[in-house]
Protein backbone atom coordinates (compact mmCIF):
# COMPACT_ATOMS: atom_id res chain seq x y z
CA UNK A 1 0.00 0.00 0.00
CA UNK A 2 1.35 3.40 -1.04
CA UNK A 3 -0.21 6.74 -0.12
CA UNK A 4 1.15 10.04 -1.47
CA UNK A 5 0.38 13.62 -0.51
CA UNK A 6 1.72 16.87 -1.98
CA UNK A 7 2.12 19.80 0.41
CA UNK A 8 3.46 23.34 0.23
CA UNK A 9 5.56 23.69 3.39
CA UNK A 10 6.92 22.17 6.58
CA UNK A 11 3.79 22.87 8.63
CA UNK A 12 1.61 21.02 6.13
CA UNK A 13 4.24 18.26 5.90
CA UNK A 14 4.18 17.72 9.66
CA UNK A 15 0.37 17.58 9.70
CA UNK A 16 0.32 15.10 6.80
CA UNK A 17 2.90 12.87 8.46
CA UNK A 18 0.88 12.89 11.69
CA UNK A 19 -2.19 11.90 9.63
CA UNK A 20 -0.29 8.97 8.08
CA UNK A 21 0.79 7.84 11.55
CA UNK A 22 -2.84 7.95 12.76
CA UNK A 23 -3.79 5.84 9.72
CA UNK A 24 -1.44 3.07 10.86
CA UNK A 25 1.83 3.81 9.08
CA UNK A 26 4.99 3.79 11.19
CA UNK A 27 7.68 6.48 11.04
CA UNK A 28 9.87 3.94 9.20
CA UNK A 29 7.25 3.82 6.42
CA UNK A 30 6.94 7.59 5.85
CA UNK A 31 9.31 9.41 3.48
CA UNK A 32 9.61 13.09 2.64
CA UNK A 33 10.99 14.34 -0.68
CA UNK A 34 11.85 17.87 -1.80
CA UNK A 35 13.59 18.89 -4.99
CA UNK A 36 16.46 20.69 -3.31
CA UNK A 37 18.69 18.40 -1.25
CA UNK A 38 19.14 20.95 1.57
CA UNK A 39 15.39 21.44 1.95
CA UNK A 40 14.80 17.70 1.87
CA UNK A 41 17.39 17.07 4.58
CA UNK A 42 16.09 19.94 6.74
CA UNK A 43 12.45 18.83 6.51
CA UNK A 44 13.34 15.16 7.01
CA UNK A 45 15.16 16.08 10.20
CA UNK A 46 12.42 18.47 11.33
CA UNK A 47 9.64 15.93 10.79
CA UNK A 48 11.65 12.87 11.92
CA UNK A 49 10.93 10.94 8.73
CA UNK A 50 12.99 8.38 6.85
CA UNK A 51 15.64 8.87 4.20
CA UNK A 52 15.35 6.62 1.16
CA UNK A 53 18.52 4.59 1.21
CA UNK A 54 20.06 1.29 0.25
CA UNK A 55 17.46 -0.81 2.06
CA UNK A 56 14.66 0.76 0.02
CA UNK A 57 16.46 1.14 -3.31
CA UNK A 58 19.03 -1.59 -3.34
CA UNK A 59 22.76 -1.21 -3.79
CA UNK A 60 22.73 -0.75 -7.57
CA UNK A 61 20.16 2.06 -7.64
CA UNK A 62 21.74 3.80 -4.66
CA UNK A 63 25.13 3.82 -6.37
CA UNK A 64 23.58 4.89 -9.70
CA UNK A 65 22.02 7.94 -8.02
CA UNK A 66 25.51 9.42 -7.69
CA UNK A 67 25.55 9.83 -11.48
CA UNK A 68 21.91 10.85 -12.00
CA UNK A 69 20.39 14.30 -12.14
CA UNK A 70 18.36 15.27 -9.06
CA UNK A 71 15.11 14.69 -11.00
CA UNK A 72 16.20 11.21 -12.11
CA UNK A 73 17.30 10.42 -8.56
CA UNK A 74 13.96 11.52 -7.09
CA UNK A 75 11.95 9.51 -9.64
CA UNK A 76 14.09 6.44 -8.90
CA UNK A 77 13.52 6.86 -5.18
CA UNK A 78 9.77 7.20 -5.62
CA UNK A 79 9.65 4.10 -7.83
CA UNK A 80 11.57 2.17 -5.15
CA UNK A 81 8.73 3.00 -2.75
CA UNK A 82 6.12 1.47 -5.06
CA UNK A 83 5.06 4.31 -7.37
CA UNK A 84 4.75 3.62 -11.08
CA UNK A 85 6.99 5.47 -13.53
CA UNK A 86 4.16 7.82 -14.64
CA UNK A 87 3.27 8.54 -10.99
CA UNK A 88 6.91 9.25 -10.14
CA UNK A 89 7.12 11.63 -13.13
CA UNK A 90 3.93 13.42 -12.03
CA UNK A 91 5.17 13.89 -8.47
CA UNK A 92 8.62 14.96 -9.65
CA UNK A 93 6.89 17.78 -11.55
CA UNK A 94 5.29 18.84 -8.25
CA UNK A 95 8.76 18.87 -6.69
CA UNK A 96 9.96 21.07 -9.58
CA UNK A 97 7.25 23.56 -8.56
CA UNK A 98 8.71 23.80 -5.05
CA UNK A 99 6.22 21.50 -3.37
CA UNK A 100 7.02 18.68 -0.96
CA UNK A 101 5.98 15.07 -1.60
CA UNK A 102 5.30 12.75 1.32
CA UNK A 103 5.10 9.03 0.63
CA UNK A 104 3.75 6.50 3.10
CA UNK A 105 4.67 3.03 1.87
CA UNK A 106 4.09 -0.42 3.36
CA UNK A 107 6.10 -1.90 0.47
CA UNK A 108 9.62 -0.64 1.22
Image: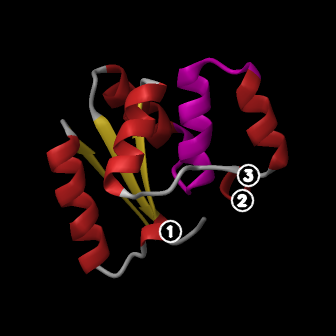
Mark seen at residue 28 = 1
Residue 18 located within the stretch drawn in magenta: no
Q: Position of residue 89 (x, y in %)?
A: 47, 31
Mark 1 or mark 3, which has the lower sequence index?
1
Corner quadrant of residue 38: top left
In terms of secondary structure, where does tag 3 sit?
Answer: helix
Could you tell me how far apart the alpha carbons at marks 2 and 1 are, in whole angstroms? 11 Å
Disc 3 to disc 2: CB gap under 8 Å: yes
The boundaries of the magenta stretch are 67-85
Could you tell me how far apart the alpha carbons at marks 3 and 2 are, in whole angstroms? 4 Å
Q: Residue 11, relative to residue 105: is it above or below?
A: above
Quadrant of the snapshot with the C terminus: bottom right
Q: Label 3 belongs to which residue? A: 54
Residue 70 located within the stretch drawn in magenta: yes
In terms of secondary structure, where does tag 1 sit?
Answer: helix
Q: Indicate left or right for 76 with 62 as reference.
A: left
| Residue that appears at 15% across and 47% down | 11
Q: Position of residue 3 (x, y in %)?
A: 36, 61
Task: Report the front residue among 11 and 87.
Answer: 11
Q: Indicate left or right for 78 with 45 as reference.
A: right
Could you tell me how far apart the alpha carbons at marks 1 and 3 are, in whole angstroms? 14 Å
Mark seen at residue 55 = 2
In terms of secondary structure, where does tag 2 sit?
Answer: helix
| Residue that appears at 45% across and 42% down | 87
Mark seen at residue 91 = none
Q: Position of residue 99 (x, y in %)?
A: 27, 31
Q: Position of residue 6 (x, y in %)?
A: 26, 43
Amino acid sequence: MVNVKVVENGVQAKATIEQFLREGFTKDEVYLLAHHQDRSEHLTELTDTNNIGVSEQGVFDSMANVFRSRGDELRSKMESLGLSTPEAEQYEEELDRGRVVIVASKIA
